Amino acid sequence: MMGSKGFTLVEILIVVIILGILAAIVIPQFTEASEDARESALASDLQTLRSQIELYKVQHNDRYPSQDSGEAVGDMDGGEFVTDLTSVTNSAGTTAAGDGALNYGPYLQAFPDNPFVDGDAGSQVTVGSGDVPADCATGWYFNTDNGKVSPGDSDHSDL
């Protein structure tokens, strides 16, 4: 027999099969890494939000963002909640200088997006009492019963 200088069909098939097996093992790990990165970002943003809300509460006479003086906790507004944390406020919690010097905040440069909620809703806040509602489609949920902010998507509301 003469010495051939090429690969046989069987050798090429074995290499292709091995590469396919390796791809089947590696590719799912990349998708899991992406999910893990989003969960880590969510946990970091959640920790920041909780600490800044507590700082706001300490500096504003035990009131939460968007809770005006004399207002019940249940009357809070999610839009004002975001504005109060991203603006400079006075001790009364208002962004107008009429009631005193604007010397508190901003507590956040920009309100974070929940990476598991699509579109503009990712940075919105729903204010309510009790657990996160199953249909909550906003980025964040502020529980007025315990003063705790949670992710608004139902898959991560237990963080």
Image (cartoon, rainbow, N blue to C red):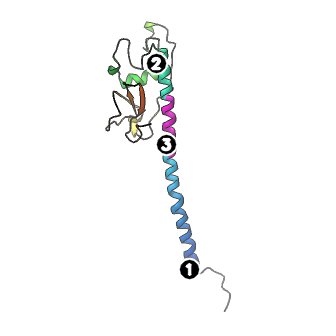
**Segment colored magenta:** 36-48
Q: Secondary structure at mark 3?
A: helix
Q: Residue furthest right?
A: 3
Report the residue at 45% width, 35% height from top.
113
| x then y, percent, for residue 67 | 38, 17
The residue pinned by badge 2 equals: 57
* Nearest-to-viewer mark from 1 and 2: 2
Q: Which mark is residue 113?
A: none
Q: Residue furthest bottom?
A: 1
- Which amino acid type corresponds to the residue marked 3 in the rendered image? Arg
The residue pinned by badge 1 equals: 10
Alpha carbon separation for disc pair 1 and 3: 43 Å
The residue pinned by badge 3 equals: 38
Say whether residue 158 is left or right of residue 23: left
In magenta stretch: residue 150: no
Report the residue at 49% width, 12% height from top.
102
Q: Secondary structure at mark 1?
A: helix
Prevailing secondary structure class for the magenta stretch in the rendered image: helix
| x then y, percent, for residue 140 | 40, 32
Vertical arrangement, residue 1 with respect to residue 108, above or below: below
| x then y, percent, for residue 146 | 40, 25
Alpha carbon separation for disc pair 1 and 2: 71 Å
- First in residue order: circle 1 vs circle 2: 1
Vertical arrangement, residue 73 with respect to residue 49, above or below: above
Q: Dots 3 and 2: beta carbons under 8 Å?
A: no
